[in-house]
Each structure stands twice: as structure tokens, then as C-alpha cells.
Amino acid sequence: MDRAGTAVRLVSSSQEQQARVGVSQWHSTTETPETSLRLPRAFTTYLHEPLAQRPAGSAGKRGECMLTFAAEQGKTRLRHSFVTHPFHLTRPWYLDPALPGMTVVYVQTPAGGLIQGDRTSLRFVLGPEAQVHLTNQAAEKIHTMTANCALQQISFVLGPGAYAEYVPEPIILFPGARFGQQLQVELGEEARFFFAELFVSHRPAGSASFDALATSLSVRNSHETLLLHDRSLVFPAQQDLAGPGILGPHHVWGQALLIGPVVPPIWAQEIHALLSGEPAVACGTTVLPGGYGIGVKVVGSEVRAVRRVLHTAWQALRTRSLGVSACVFPK
């Protein structure tokens, strides 16, 4: 499989520099997920496997999405953007009646999923008091691979008082898929970040599982103090996912978390009580290290059931943190 793409830069370098005042710098366009991701050593062996088609991370197999937002007169505006294949950006929307100034952005991937050798980077910068909800239009497929892997790096920089929600559609891991993802977040003073993700192991009758999955989530404050680091490495061929303490009989799993200012520990108990009534899932709720937020993890056998748990968690966390309920955005 192969494909090619083109890029159009929408702003000049000087404009980008002005947009970065008071926030972290853009990644250099010469930096790739291969050089910037901190992958487990056992996973990096895939990086050196040659491809019969276009080399890994080359033109058409390297995508970037870089967006900068600023709060102006009660509304958050998209001020600068740089997007290349396989990403496509719609215009910002204002769809949340509870937060009318929040911009809602759909980052689309019309290419049909990630294949071997793909390398993608997404970077979102929010100025002070900006409010952004980021999602995509449909589930992301990680296709079957015979060599190398697919990598995705995501980073958020939130200025003081900013609020971001990152709620992508499920990631579907096809048999033989090898996928590495790293999410890095930098929080300014009083900034808040909500994140929910969902993975599905797609195994048609008689087929094998995905080959490998490596994920990493790290959150730091503006002083570079580490607030949270969570990572996982899964090789189903080496350790059966159906084993005790892993997925058991399930093939769908996900997590949701809100991190920012210190929260009351009672929130974890209240949210767990809300989630415990959902049938056909197993879930847990915890206070994050230092009390800087709440985390929820869930496994199940149905995507709909796991999604309900994650949405309920989002609803509860948003209500407690911002005083407004969560919205169901059109897809």
C-alpha cells in the first residue's frame, strides 16, 4: 500500500512566531515521531524493518496537524494552522450551548486509516483562557502490517486558565497491526485538560490479534514538573490478552481523565458510584497522583457500553469541574 500527499502552509513563519508568545514553541518540521517519541526498546525493533514500498515517514507517509487557538472577546478563535495529508481540517464550530465560546474542531483523516510506515504528529496550542473541544469524524483504523509500524505523536500546550477536551473516536486495531502513540500535555496555571480514548481489538473469526501496542501519556505543568505518567506495552502473541488482570473475556478498553487543579478526593467515589451500575463492563476510578485530577479505566465487550461509561465520566467530571454538563456533538 502506498499513497502521496501535499501540504499548504496557511501562515508565515513570522506569524507563527507572534502566535507563540507566552506558549511553548512549535516542533521543528524536521522532527518526526521516530526521533521524538520515547518508545519502549522492545517496540523500537519495528522501526528498523524495511518496507517494500515508500520508506517509513517519507512524503505521503508523514502527516502533520498544528493548530493555535486564542481567546478573544469571549470566544476562542483558530488563529494559525498547518495541516498535511492524511489530515483535513474543517472550520471551527460553536456547538456547545453550555460553553458558547468554546470552539469545536473536527480533525478529519479521509485516508482511511494508518498503514505500515505512517508517521503522524498533532500539536495543539491554546492561549490563556482558550476553550477547545477536539475530536475526529470517525474511528481510526490501524491496518494489518507485515513490516515496520505506525506511529502517532500528540501534544497539547495550554496557557493559564485554558481548557481543552480531546475526545477522539475509537482506535480499531486490525490483526497484525503495530501501533505506537504518545500524548504529551503541558498545563499552564489553572489550566484543565480532559481526555478520553477507546481501543478495539478487531479479530474476525479465526484471525490473530494485533501484533503490538505501545501507548504513553505524560502531563507536566509550565514549570516542567511531572504530574502524571502512564504507559502501556502489549504484545498479544507473548502474553494472552484474555489472561487474568488484563482484558479477560473483553476486547474493548478505554480511559478518561481530567487533570488540572487539585480536586476533592470524594469525586472519585461519587463518579465510581455512577459508573458501577453499567452492565457488561468492568471499571475503576482513582484520584490522580497529587490530587491533580480523576482517572477512569474501563474494559468491556461492546463498544457502546464502554462509550457510555466514558461519556458518563466526562459528564460527571465536567459538571464538577466547570459547573456545566457535557454535550453530544454531531458526527
Image (cartoon, grey):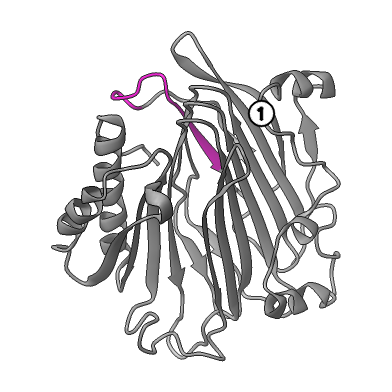
Q: Residue 98 magenta-drawn?
A: yes
* Observer-nearest of 177 and 192: 192
The secondary structure type at the circle numbered 1 is loop
Image coordinates of residue 90 in percent, x first then y, are 56, 32
Q: Residue 29 magenta-drawn?
A: no
Q: Quadrant of the C terminus?
A: top left
Query: Which image quarter: residue 28?
Result: top right
Q: Which residue is at 63% across, 28% downward?
A: 68
Q: Which residue is at 32% across, 43% downward?
A: 263
For the residue marked with disc 1, what is the amino acid?
Val
Query: Which image quarter: residue 321?
Result: top left
Q: Which residue is at 56% across, 90% downward?
A: 237
Residue 147 appears anywhere in the view: yes
* Observer-nearest of 310 and 226: 226
Image coordinates of residue 24 in percent, x first then y, are 69, 33
Image coordinates of residue 10 in percent, x first then y, are 75, 25
Work out whether 309 lies above or below 166. Answer: below
* Observer-nearest of 81 and 295: 295
- Which contiguous range is marked in magenta? 96-107
Work out whether 279 lies above or below 75. Answer: below
Count of marks placed on residues:
1
Image coordinates of residue 107 in percent, x first then y, are 56, 40
Q: Look at mark 1 in the image and give the residue it sits on.
A: 23
